[in-house]
Image: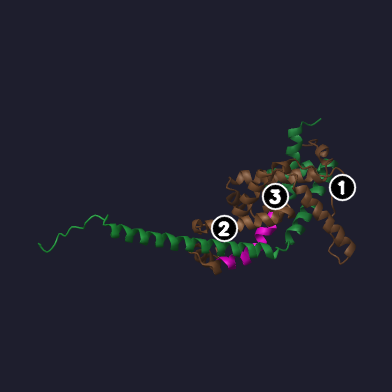
Chain colours: A green, B brown
Amino acid sequence: MIPEGERLEILEKIGAYTAGELEGDEARRAEQLILENEDNQRLSEAYTRMLILLSVMGQESPVTPDTVVDYAVQRAYYSALMRQTETFFSDLGRSYLDAFVYYLGLRPKQESYGGGF
Amino acid sequence: MNTVDRDLSARAAQGDLSAFSQLVHEYSDLVYRVASRILGADDAQDASQEVWIRVWRNIKDFEGQSAFSTWLYRITVNTCLNARRKDSRREQRETRDDFLYLPEPPGGDNDPEAATLGRERMSEVLKALQGIRSEHRAALVLRHLEGLGYAEIAEIMDVPEGTAKGWVSRGRTALLLTLVPETGSHANGGGLS
């Protein structure tokens, strides 16, 4: 009986070999593993079929619903509008505050350093 | 990075809405495709919308050191993984027990029956993908469905390349075990010495 961890390691090794991701000694060891055991050959075939299926699926692209694009663009416009509105009102508020401070005479008197008067 | 993307992303970062709109139109398929493969079709739409909100909010931080698509992949994968974490019940979703055969690849002929069968098998694979640990699934999708290299996967997932390889490998094995449960007992170490 092969320990669980070792079995998974063999599964991963065969998967990596089938996906063409092993080189050199590692690839040769995986080849040996596959050639010397029928179950492992079946595993390799199963991996091959799965990878072909994944590859075919990879070439297909689901159609993006129009709502996704529309929503993204609308949100950006809304966000930009809110940002501009916020900037406008904060600038306006600051101007009013400055005017009010000036009106109440709370702004420190600016001293003159020139002219000698 | 291609110059058009660089120009569009730079303009979008300045608040140019038409540039952002162009980016959305150009890349919405990529985002939706990856989201639907990681999360399944039901949640892909919400996740895609969330991705674009994040892109708009964060595009000022995109410095152009990597391709725009790599940056977008990263936001998409992170958004999908966060969505999965929020709904941890999905992690325990059981896959069908009666899937005891390995799907044959769909034929290349024009046989509608074969095409239907191929489509059914693909949907079974997509369903089986949902039973795999999130990080492993995302890495597997990027590698075998998006066709990316390990260096780019590592950059997108913000992990070392070795970790990305390990995640793909474990995801691949988990997918096979889900599709063909009996393969777990087939792996035989005999002959490896």
Query: What residue is disc 3 on?
Result: B140
**Would you say residue B10 is visible in this rendering?**
yes
The image position of residue B122, as x and y in percent, is 80, 55
**Where is residue B54 drawn, in percent x and y?**
57, 55
Query: Mark 3 or 1 closer to N-term?
Result: 1
Residue at numbered disc 1: B101
Q: Nearer the viewer, residue A87 or A42?
A: A87
Pick the residue in front: B13 or A52.
Answer: B13
Q: Give me the residue at 74% from left, 54% from top.
A: B42
Which SS class for mark 3?
helix
Are the numbered discs 2 and 1 placed on the same chain, yes or no?
A: yes
Q: In the drawing, does residue B13 fall left or right of residue B99?
A: left
**Circle 2 sits on which residue?**
B55
Q: Mark 3 lies on which chain?
A: B
Q: Is mark 2 on a helix, strand or loop?
A: helix
Amino acid bearing label 2:
Val
Chain designation of label 1: B
Residue B159's image quarter? Answer: top right
Task: Check disc 1 and give the amino acid type.
Answer: Tyr
Work out which quarter of the rendered image holds the C terminus of chain B and state it: top right
